[in-house]
Image (cartoon, rainbow, N blue to C red):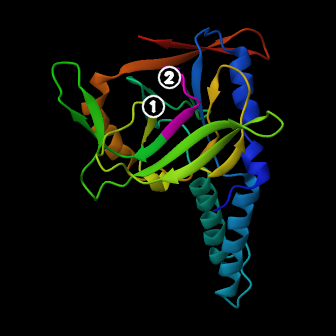
Amino acid sequence: MKASISEKFKGLALVFVFLIQSLQADTRLVLYFSHLPQSEISLIQSEFKKEQSNSTNELITLSTPGGLAADQVEQAMKQFLTPKLSGFPILYAGYITITDSDGLATFPLRHAQQKLYIAVTPDIKMIHVKGSSFSHAEYSPDQAVALSLYKCEKLDDDKKQPFWKVTKIDKPDTNRINPITTVILTHPDNIYVPEGDIMASKGEQLILPPIRVIGTQDKDLVNLRLLDIKPYFEQVQSEQKRVNDTTIQKITTTF
């Protein structure tokens, strides 16, 4: 699945609005989860309908039981292609948060490099746990635990316009998680990270390219595992404050 030009630019507007309205002065790391572009969703639905029509020689209408079933299948597919954006746990630099209903997640930025790793895996291993602390975290040594890992570098083109260079990479031999990694705790089949060169924003805030949500496989199981991990990370929470009828400000706090 290749990232189209429209896909690379789509979704950034919501992130920009979030940053403009944010009351938090601290420099932030911002992740934005979204659905697949509508053009791709429509294409998948069209291909599905084509396969359905090729599998039968009968004309099915909504007035028939078969038509009702087909309509229900279409609705189920729509829900399948647009899963909930909320509830994805993310770890970064000793912090933990979950995506909100808009698919947004933010952290205090705790590294200076214009580079970051994105790991998508349902489980990690805490090393040398003592009390409420640990020395570092590692990817699970269990080969059955799926992992997708990406390197994101923020660069400038010939016109000094910033862009992200996103590349899928192999897991390190040591399994050790690099400190400048955001770990999305979910099965990799649930997440699509567009690769290639993707437009980036200017400014101090580090806004990652949009991340596509394409499933919710094993979400309940991940939440159970999260109970063992959560106590070792500081929670980040966002609350919304309505300023007027058209403006909502978002305050991000750690505690």
**Contact flag, marks 2 and 1 (Cβ < 8 Å):** yes
| Circle 1: element type | loop
Q: Mark 1: few, some, or many residues within 10 Å (few <14, many ≥20)?
A: some
| Residue tagged 1 | 180
Q: Which residues are magenta?
A: 106-117
- Confirm whether residue 192 shows in the render: no
Q: Position of residue 232 (x, y in %)?
A: 28, 23
Question: The N terminus is located in which quarter?
Answer: bottom right
Report crowding for label 2: few under 14, some 14 to 19, many 20 or more residues within 10 A (C-alpha): few
Q: Is residue 187 highlighted in magenta? A: no
Left or right of 164, for residue 9: right
Going 73% across and 49% down the picture, which residue do you hit?
7
Picture quadrant where residue 128 is located: top left
* View extreme (right): residue: 159
Q: Which residue is mark 2?
A: 111
Instruction: Specify which label sits upstream in the sequence, 2 or 1.
Output: 2
Can you say whether 185 is above or below 146 in the image? above
Quarter of the image with the C terminus in it = top left
Is residue 51 something one can see in this rendering? Answer: yes
Q: Residue at x 72, y 51 (%)?
A: 37
